[in-house]
Amino acid sequence: MSRSYISLGFAFVFFFAFADVGFAGPRTLLIGVDAIPYEVARKLTDPNLGEQALFKGLKGPAAVINTFPTGSYVAWTGLLRPLGVAKALGYEACHFDRQQAQLRGCFSLNTVPAPWKQMFDWYLKGIARKAIAYGWPKKYSVSEMEQGFDAFQASDKEFFGMYIVSTDGLGHVYGPEGLSDFLRKLDRGLLDLRERMLDKPFQTVIVSDHGMPGGQPLKNTWPGVKDAMDRAGLHVASSLERENDVVIVKFGLLSSFVLYTRKDIEAKVASVLVSVPGVDLCVLPHHEGWQVASARGDALIQRKQGPAGELWSYQILSGDPLNYSSIVVRLQERAVDKTKTWFPDEWWFDASKDHFYPDALYRLAEGFALVENPASILCSNRPGYMFGSLLTERAAIPTIGRLKWTHGALYRDAAFGFLMSDIPDWPISDAVRFDRALAPLAGLIE
């Protein structure tokens, strides 16, 4: 028998032997973790730690510059956009429904649809279970990890996603120390899972949706916002029946907040808000783009399509609310044209990714595009401040004390999540925009 026939015979045997077990390479496990900052992951994976470094074999971490506001509903919608996720109804489960002109999902035990959650094969279901998990985040973050791993091991899906929510409560209560402890347990848990699944190898992607800055007791800007609006003749309401009604959606003790108003009073409301101590800046739609307002001044963000792609402009109206004037100068030098005002999207990203407000033009504009019911105004607090219910703030004091850690704002410590992977050809860089971070997974989704 000739060598060619022998080779052909082996090929048939090989094909039929592996056809029924899905011989198509390793499976893929996506682990979504809530609210673990880039800096926490970077320090724990530093190669200088030697044997103490975590997640050996995974590339990264890369800093993921996530959405604004930096909350889970918006951030996961942005992260999963390349995979085909639908828009969220609002910035959290509690949202303002523009069509019905009222708040929804705020005081109901009914589950509010969240398309981004449906992209995960395993996540903690039920409002009651989530509330319990937030009450005991150290225990439940590990429990979620273990349940997710068990579900993956029992599944035959080639691509499997799991989402751990308790780490958000862990960060709010214990800060970086608690999140570091969880990552050590996640590293150990992954090693154990691989040992249990030696006959079913898999590759891994780990991604976090935003950061968790803080360290000192946070001041609540809500009382100041309410007083300033009262003085300006604006009425905090649950609908927009009267001319000066303003709906404020309070969805926790975060460092950002969203408001809904009639179109003709948006600029007036923003000017009132930025006068409040602790409120850093607000952004609102403008007929030519988006207006950024702050006590430092105002600016206009514009976007247009150029011959080679998207172009952006940052036009200072007064002052410099984003402190981006030096970036404009650098981009003009790169273009060798001191009169130029429009620059490519990639130039803006490269020039601003390490700024205090990273990738702000894109993120501020997309803050109105990622939800079905976009706000009239989006506001970001300064470091050291939060915004939310006084009842929630005071109820926390007897149990965990004054809240010291939160997220939501535009600045980098709130924005930076992280990305790691051991997929061989995964393009890990130093920083990546939220809707590019998981784009390599698009081909793996059925």
Image (spheres, rainbow, N blue to C red):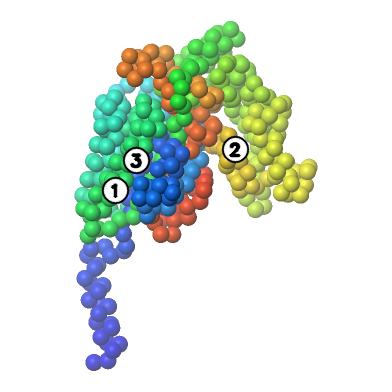
Q: Position of residue 79 (x, y in %)?
A: 45, 42
Q: Residue at x 50, y 12 (%)?
A: 223
Q: In terms of secondary structure, where does tag 3 sit?
A: helix
- Quadrant (top left/top right/bottom left/bottom right) for the N terminus: bottom left
Do labels 1 and 2 touch, CB within 8 Å?
no
Q: Residue at x 41, y 28 (%)?
A: 92
- In the image: residue 335, left or right of residue 355: right
**What separation in Å lies between label 3 and label 1 (alpha carbons)?**
10 Å
Q: In terms of secondary structure, where does tag 1 sit?
A: helix
Depth order, front residue of 394/111: 394
Residue furthest bottom as drawn? 1
Q: Amino acid at mark 2?
A: His
Q: Amino acid at mark 1?
A: Leu
Instruction: Specify the quadrant of the image occupied by residue 268.
Output: top right
Q: Residue at x 40, y 43 (%)?
A: 44
Residue 192, placed above or below residue 166: below
Depth order, front residue of 9/234: 9
Please name the residue that numbered disc 1 is placed on.
Answer: 190
**What separation in Å lies between label 1 and label 2 (alpha carbons)?**
34 Å
